[in-house]
Amino acid sequence: MALLSALALGAALATPAPCGTFSQEKSLAGLAKPFVSEGRYQLKDGELSWHTLKPFESTLQISKAGLYQQLPGQARQQIASGDNPLAASLAELLGAVVRGDTAALKAHFSVEGEGAQQTLVPKDALLQKAISRIVIDGEPPRAIRLDEHQGGQTLITLQPGQCQ
């Protein structure tokens, strides 16, 4: 799920590369093969655009104004609101990542390790229902592994590139 996969920590890992490509493998308990998606990301003016190109096109935009998704030929829709507390909480954290607000992230996660590899463990009971931990490798982040409590796992590989 793109909402969970954009989480990362900025402080000790330096500033994330402002743009590039990503590959994401989503494994679920009971499925033999992971779901793989690929696309581009761009961090600009405090907004993260996560543009999935394969297997189907969609764009996730994370900004201070909120969390939005857009499919080709359709209007942009807000996907996190008070109606879904977990999505709203994750959207807030994603905004903190985009802004490099490490204080906000440290309020919700305990940080284990230092330097090029860190593990984030949720402190927040709501987040603990969805995420058991996030492992971040690289400075800036090159790989992010998100482990879910129900056995799922998302592995994101980031390749910095030229901004468009």
Image (cartoon, rainbow, N blue to C red):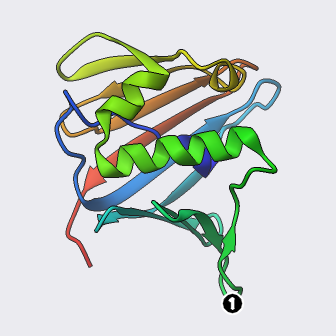
**Left or right: where does residue 71 sit relative to residue 120?**
right
144 over 123 or under it: above or below: below
**Residue depicted at 75% across the width and 50% down the height:** 82
Q: Quadrant of residue 97?
A: top left
User: Which residue of the protein is positioned furthest toward the bottom in this rendering?
Assistant: 73
**Residue depicted at 29% across the width and 67% down the height:** 44
**Left or right: where does residue 91 sit relative to residue 114?**
right
43 over 85 or under it: above or below: below
Depth check: give the residue in front, 94 or 31. Answer: 94
Query: In the rendering, at what x and y percent does residue 54 appear?
Result: 58, 65
Depth check: give the residue in front, 123 or 21. Answer: 123
Asked whether residue 88 is in view, the answer is yes
Query: In the rendering, at what x and y percent does residue 51 appear?
Result: 49, 67
**Residue depicted at 68% across the width and 55% down the height:** 80
Query: In the rendering, at what x and y percent does residue 40 appear?
Result: 40, 64
Q: Amino acid at mark 1?
A: Gly
Q: Quadrant of the C terminus?
A: bottom left
Residue wearing tag 1: 73
**Residue depicted at 47% across the width and 28% down the height:** 145
Q: Secondary structure at mark 1?
A: loop
